[in-house]
Amino acid sequence: MGKALRLETNDSQNSLFVIDEVCHAVLSYYALDARSYKGKHIARNNYRATAQAGLRVFIWSQTGYSPSTLTAEQIELIESIPGLIATVERLQSQIQNLLPPDSTVPPPGWDKQTWDNLPSPDKRHFRFLHRRRGFTPSTSQMSSDSIQETRNAVKQKQQKELQAVTKPLSPEETARFEQLKQKARLQSF
């Protein structure tokens, strides 16, 4: 298996972070390589700011330099750090949806032990539900009555969606459909 693209933390929320190399690759792609799109200038500005700050930190770490007084530019860069962190966090959340799911990491809201005990098809199903529908497991046990209410609500919603999508058949279509049904019955004997 290749290099891990996510970092796991030991905090109480089981936070996941995308590694810096992936963030850099995505940011540089959208800033430099992607065709023109609405926010490309923002990506370029963010790329320049992170490159400038990163190069400065690299040079200072290699030379052992430590500034005694800060210049106006340095103060401006330090003040821009929260904005850059917010940008990186947005990128990480967007990248999480683009990366293939890691089979060892449960989706948010899942207990690690419960997740590990699920069969593989169920894990794929719940990952799909989490990505597409925002599903997270309930922390409280549902009663059978509330489960039945939920089922009925889902059925009603599905029926409404089906009615909205389908249109009534014309009399000609209904007659043609009945003819085909009778023909199929005769052929089955």
Image (tube, helix red, strand yellow):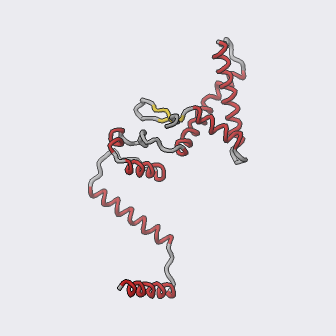
Residue 83 x, y percent position in the rendering: 62, 33
Residue 63 x, y percent position in the rendering: 67, 13
Residue positioned 64% across, 24% down in the render? 78
Q: Is residue 99 above or below residue 7?
A: below
For the residue pair 36 and 180, the one nearer the viewer reads as 180
Can the viewer see residue 17?
no
As drawn, the residue found furthest toward the left would be: 144
Can the viewer see residue 162?
yes
Residue 19, by quadrant, is top right
Quadrant (top left, top right, bottom left, bottom right) of the C terminus: bottom left
Residue positioned 60% across, 30% down in the render? 82
Residue 160 x, y percent position in the rendering: 45, 68
For the residue pair 30 and 73, the one nearer the viewer reads as 30
From the viewer's perspective, tell me whether residue 65 is left or right of residue 116: right
From the viewer's perspective, tell me whether residue 156 is left or right of residue 16: left
Residue 71, by quadrant, is top right
Residue 132 x, y percent position in the rendering: 48, 52
From the viewer's perspective, tell me whether residue 84 is left or right of residue 137: right
